Image (cartoon, rainbow, N blue to C red):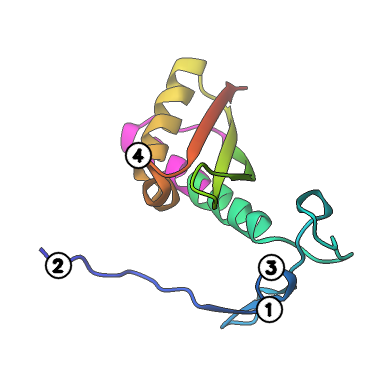
């Protein structure tokens, strides 16, 4: 079975974590800096790869939840996803990520909100990409 790629995004980074990255469409064009908490310079006006991943994951996860809410016919008024991405040392001498997703679902009871978010987690490409490799914690709050 051949799976067709629906979309491909491209970006270039130079200088690693203390460098620069930009997307091919020019919409992302940012300076990177290792934060002071990790022993880096923490340059003013710079961001980190973790910030970029958190923004992308939050958006993708929200869309997956919205999609699955329609599939399940449990339509909320809104879904807001806050994503925190942490970096930590692993046992092999390298590094790993942690993710905390705080999802606020307006207009559904808690049980239905949890169903929508669980289905969104199964459908989300970011969730599927990191499954088994990253500790992901999800908190769902129905409003």
State left or right for residue 122 relative to residue 88: left
Crowd around label 1: few <14 · some 14–19 · many ≥20 (10 Å): few
Q: How far apart are marks 4 and 2 (CA)?
A: 21 Å
Q: How far across and down, in percent of the image, does residue 107 sit?
A: 56, 25
What residue lies at 47% left-to-right and 42% top-to-bottom?
134
Secondary structure under tag 3 reads helix
Residue stretch rendered in magenta on the structure: 62-79
Name the N-terminal-most of marks 3 and 2: 2
Q: In which quarter of the image is the C terminus?
A: top right
* Image quadrant in which you'd find residue 80: top right
- Specify whether residue 86 is painted magenta: no
* Residue underneath mark 3: 17
First reached walking from the N terminus: tag 4 or tag 2: 2
- In space, the residues marked 1 and 3 are separated at their CA atoms by 7 Å
At horizontal 80% and vertical 55% (from top left) the residue drawn is: 39
- Numbered label attached to residue 2: 2
Q: Where is residue 15 in the image (x, y as percent from the top left)?
A: 68, 78
Front of the two marks 4 and 3: 3
Say whether marks 1 and 4 touch (CB < 8 Å): no
């Amino acid at each position: 079975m051949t799976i067709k790629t629906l979309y491909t995004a491209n970006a270039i980074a130079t200088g690693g974590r203390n460098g620069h990255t930009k997307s091919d469409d020019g919409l992302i064009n940012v300076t990177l800096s290792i934060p002071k908490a990790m022993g880096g310079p923490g340059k003013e006006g710079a961001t980190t790869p973790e910030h970029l991943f958190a923004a992308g994951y939050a958006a993708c996860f929200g869309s997956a939840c919205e999609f699955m809410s329609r599939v399940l016919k449990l339509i909320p008024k809104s879904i807001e996803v806050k994503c925190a991405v942490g970096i930590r040392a692993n046992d092999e001498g390298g590094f790993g990520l942690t993710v905390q997703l705080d999802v606020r679902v307006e207009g559904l009871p808690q049980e239905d909100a949890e169903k929508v978010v669980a289905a969104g987690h199964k459908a989300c490409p970011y969730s599927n990409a990191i499954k088994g490799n990253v500790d992901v914690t999800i908190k769902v709050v129905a409003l």
